[in-house]
Amino acid sequence: MTALHPPAAIRAARLMDGNLAAAWGARLARAEVLPMYPITPAYPAMEHLTGFVERGELKARFIRVESDHSAMAACVGAALTGARTFTVTSSQGLAYMSEVLHQASGLRLPIVMAVVNRALHAPHSRWPDHGDAISQESSGWLQFFCETVQEVLDTTIQAFRIAQDERVQLPVMVNYEGYILSHAREPVHVPDQAEVDAFLPLIRRRHLDVDNPLAINAASNTEVYWGYKYNQHRAMGAAREVIREVDADFRRRFGREWGGLAEAYRTEGARTLVVTMGSMAASARVAVDRLRDAGRPAGLLKVRAFRPFPADELVAAAAGADLVVVIDRNIVYGAGGAVAREVKGALWGAGLRPRIAGWIAGLGGQDVGVEGIERMVRASEAKDADALREPLWYGLDEGGEGQ
Amino acid sequence: MSVPLEPVEPWLTGGHLACPGCGAALAIRLAGHALGRRSIVAVPASCAGTIGANSLHTAWQIPFFHTLFESAPAVAAGIRAGLEAQGIEDVHVVSWAGDAGTGDIGLQALSAAAERNDDILHVCYDNELAMNTGGQADGATPLASRSSVTPGGKLTPKKDLPAILAAHGVPYVATASVAYPEDFLAKLRKASLIRGFRYIHVLAPCHVGWDIPPEQSIRVTRMATTSGLWPLYEIENGVKRQTVIPEPKVPVREYVRAQGRFRTLDEAQVEALQRWVDSRDA
């Protein structure tokens, strides 16, 4: 549950955009190595961090790499020495990193990366959607999607603790949408450094150490390889409990929590369940309120962790629903939205059979808003089973304007 | 100076998977003499990346990391930063790549590390072909050399990587050859005492790719230098100095005719190559 800030707290907050919040998260986490390469709209996060370093507010080594590929490669090198490592990227930069992302997760390195979500080419677009992160869904990274600027800061701090947890030891992406969150300012509470230090002790694992030489990433035989992959998958599963624990501990210390893997909003008795990720969840809350006010028992499940996927949370939220409306800000061509696909799999596995409407909305910055979500919910109610087999497109299938 | 038969602190022990007569393994073995065991090495996709470790066994005696093909210098930069962040000093951080991992797919990260003057040593062991994948031509393959993708001989000349690196204005650039171990070791030692970005490009034959008998590897590699095709020099803070004056010089013909990879070269091309060497020396 997102705590509402009372006016006094607002006065104590600082005005921040998402990029500054991510930079503050890494600063409070005392990141030690920062290999980064600028890409719009992520580069201000890098500039904030270089400023922190320059002014002596953060004791870290910034590496001005020439590309996102080298940024992640340098992250891997630094993390192998046991240093706490952070970087930031977006869109094409994330795609360019792809092979190194797979290596970082296979090496079980606790790297944390802010990803400013921006539509991938082609056509060229500067505007937000989740396609970049979804393209890396099988890279072995945990993926969080943020709704607010405060959540960006808090999740960045949490990410370091989750990544280094003995049960996890996997890299983590903190996703927030370009411009909507990266450049929009909100009042943000900056936790006290000493309290963050207490919440986030440093666990150092030195893999490259001249006093204990190891050969890392040798060519593996088949048995070794699939054994590694099995352990990696197990760790991703174990991360679910760790994410819940870390969020609960965060609430105890800082008074804010983000629902762990997924936040259920007004899902009690919900017959219609909206499922979405990122900033669209903010519009969906208001849409749910309006639907409730109009007498429709609607609820929202905000998917916060896309990887690992919150199947249990979804099943609990959808228990009484006869309609699930999934809104994806991404498209897996020939299949549909990635969240809708997960939702169908999770509900099928739990024996739940609500009607599921999968919507593609907000691609390349398409404006959706509260009314758009309300329209999608109403249109979903009217669709027959045949129409729900294919993804529905906002702007085409909801009726009204944009038809 | 004499080179002991066994390195004082070899980086690789016996049991590695290199072919007999492998120039790459020899270069690694020699590096142990000069740099010692307080070294961390990052090696991209290459023979050097695979000969020293396999599954749960390794012949590496120092920390070794097998990087992605483009990444060795960037990984090394990250390793250096990670060590510095922890106050760990007196460790040599080395990115050690073949010709493709250095000058083709690896050139972008290498150029950036050089421009940043990162405190790392990059060693390019150059067998003038992409041998780990079976002998395809790459940017370091000489003009007219046959390969699995240039059966009639390569149509363009060898990329001058030491010159490209020197153009970055880094503190130290050197060429070397496994056939001149004293010179190679002296350059490694000198590089190990310099802070900032250092680059050593060592000619390391692959008898398979060069199409020569394995026992001829060193003899033929020496001729690369005595013929003038692979001069040995160093560039220290912009000042270039030839470190080996080969005596006696041999004709280019003797070098190329000793190898199967140049068998498509006709006499006119050999003479043209000789004229090019002579004009460069003039």
Image (spheres, rainbow, N blue to C red):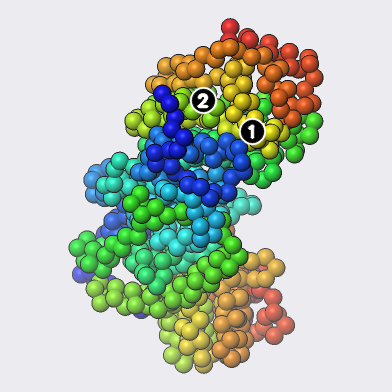
- Which residue is depicted at the point 48% across and 47% down? B13
**Relative to residue A251, is residue A105 drawn left or right?**
right
Q: Chain of mark 1?
A: B
| Residue A381 pos. (x, y %) | 61, 85
| Residue B182 pos. (x, y %) | 45, 26
Check disc 1 and report the residue beneath it: B215
Secondary structure at badge 2 equals loop
Q: Earlier in the sequence, mark 2 or mark 1?
A: 2
| Mark pair 2, 1: CA separation | 16 Å
- Which residue is depicted at the point 80% across and 19% down? B266
**Relative to residue B236, is residue A330 drawn left or right?**
right
Can residue A352 be seen by looking at this rendering? yes
In the displayed structure, B166 sits above or below A368; it is above
Quarter occupied by residue B151: top right
Quarter the C terminus of chain B occupies = top right
Q: Chain of mark 2?
A: B
Secondary structure at badge 1 equals helix
Q: Nearer the viewer, residue A89 or A80?
A: A80
- Which residue is depicted at the point 59% across and 17% down? B226
Q: Nearer the viewer, residue A194 or B192?
A: B192
Total tally of numbered discs in the picture: 2
Check disc 2 and report the residue beneath it: B180
Quarter the N terminus of chain B occupies = top left
What kind of residue is marked 2? Tyr
Q: Nearer the viewer, residue B206 or B68?
A: B206
Can residue A94 be seen by looking at this rendering? no
